[in-house]
Amino acid sequence: MISILNFTFGSSVTVEEYNALRAAVGWRILSTRQARCTVENSAFLVTALHEGKVVGMARAITDGGYVSGFHLPQSLILSIISTPL
């Protein structure tokens, strides 16, 4: 049997969707304030949607530091969450 999954990609996630992803992988649920700060302060955020539902996301944060006159992050933290389909 061949199964094909179709994904679309977005750049936003609600607090509820973010916490649902966290719960799906066994991470603790954040307060509304914590989750909102997490999402809003991401330097980069991409979501994967399947049949209109957010099933995964990746985000990056940085300190916005400068290295050798170029705007390159001095530190980068990346988190990736994906639910089983």
Image (tube, rainbow, N blue to C red):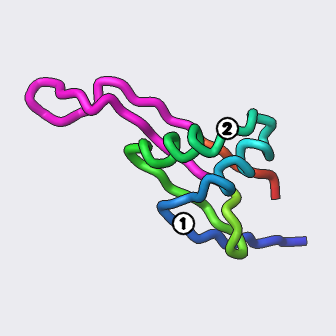
Q: Is residue 64 left or right of residue 69?
A: right
For the point 58% across and 71% down, which residue is it?
8
Residue 3, image x, y percentages = 82, 71
Quarter of the image where one finds residue 53: bottom right
Q: Is residue 29 above or below residue 82?
A: above
Q: How many marks are shown on the rendered structure?
A: 2
Residue 66, image x, y percentages = 18, 28
Amino acid identity at mark 2: Leu
Kindly identify which residue carries mark 1. Answer: 9
Residue range (magenta): 56-79
Amino acid identity at mark 1: Phe
For the point 51% across and 65% down, which residue is it?
10
The numbered mark, 1 or 2, whose residue comes first in the sequence reads: 1
Residue 68 among those drawn in magenta? yes
Q: Which residue occupies the foreground of this view, 2 or 79?
A: 79
Q: Is residue 51 above or below residue 84?
A: below
Kindly identify which residue carries mark 2. Answer: 30
Q: Is residue 62 left or right of residue 20?
A: left
SS state under label 1 = strand
Q: Which residue occupies the foreground of this view, 33 or 24?
A: 33
Mark toward the viewer: 1 or 2: 2
Quarter of the image where one finds residue 70: top left
Residue 50, image x, y percentages = 70, 69
Q: Is residue 71 left or right of residue 8?
A: left
Q: Is residue 52 above or below residue 35?
A: below
Any mark on residue 22, and which? Answer: none
Q: CA distance from mark 1 to mark 2?
A: 24 Å
